Image (spheres, rainbow, N blue to C red):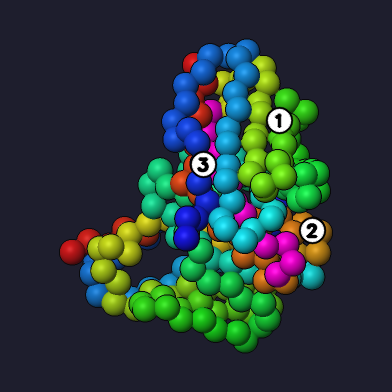
Amino acid sequence: DAGVTQSPTHLIKTRGQQVTLRCSPKSGHDTVSWYQQALGQGPQFIFQYYEEEERQRGNFPDRFSGHQFPNYSSELNVNALLLGDSALYLCASSPLAEAKNIQYFGAGTRLSVL
Amino acid sequence: EDQVTQSPEALRLQEGESSSLNCSYTVSGLRGLFWYRQDPGKGPEFLFTLYSAGEEKEKERLKATLTKKESFLHITAPKPEDSATYLCALNYGGSQGNLIFGKGTKLSVKP
């Protein structure tokens, strides 16, 4: 049973560019959440998708957007990249119907903005 | 003010030297407190979830406990392979399902 998979593993971009990160949830999970983790910090919540809609959003600007597909996979898009967007981007999935709400994380995408 | 505070920031132990990591929180309406382990450059790996004060969970050398305002992760006779960053996260009424993380405790266990 494959866990949460993310692609690519590493990415280098320059300021002002746009980037798309991808995530496939764990089998049986229908909810996908995205987090940003700066070096030495805990992950910070960006947004959560369920039934192809953004269900919740953290304190991130509109440059951060996402999408969820009918097969529950998801994309995170970041426009007009800033140096401060350099971080590890984590995707987590969970079965929304489960009250425990345990989120399982992928290995992340390391984004470097030069 | 941080909603979730972990201490210490870093902890160095000798192999076999037991210790505890602390996670304190200020929110009310806790729905769940989660412990994760994160190795360098990897995503967080789920360890435990606790839902009510007095609850305890164990796995190998790790034991997690929960009181009304804090949780402890006890490590008994640690081994070098336990070296990692341990993250505490919580889900409460105001977070509506997403996790609020602490900054983590970086544990190093020397042989």
Confirm or deny contact between disc 3 and disc 2 (CB under 8 A). no
Residue drawn at x 65%, y 34% is: A76
Q: Which residue is mark 2?
A: B96
Q: Nearer the viewer, residue A102 or B60?
A: A102
Determine the secondary structure under disc 2: loop
Q: Residue furthest front?
A: A71
Q: Amino acid at mark 2?
A: Gln
Q: Residue furthest bottom?
A: B54
**Alpha-carbon neighbours of circle 2 within 10 Å: few (<14), some, or many (≥20)?**
few
Percent x, y of residue A58? 75, 43
Report if residue A109 lies within the magenta region.
Answer: no
Quarter residue A75 falls in? top right
Q: Amino acid at mark 3?
A: Gln
Chain under numbered label 1: A
Report if residue A95 lies within the magenta region.
Answer: yes
Q: CA distance from mark 1 to mark 3?
A: 17 Å
**Alpha-carbon neighbours of circle 1 within 10 Å: few (<14), some, or many (≥20)?**
some
Q: Amino acid at mark 1?
A: Phe
Range of residues picked out in magenta: A86-98
Percent x, y of residue A77? 66, 29
Chain under numbered label 3: A
Q: Which residue is mark 3?
A: A6
Residue drawn at x 77%, y 44% is: A52
Dominant secondary-structure state across the stretch colored magenta: strand
Label of residue A64 in the image? 1
Residue drawn at x 69%, y 54% is: A31
For this view, does B59 lie left or right of residue A113?
Answer: left
Determine the secondary structure under disc 3: strand
For this view, does B29 lie left or right of residue B101?
Answer: right
Q: Height in image: A87 above or below A104?
A: above
Q: Height in image: A26 above or below A37?
A: below
Chain under numbered label 2: B
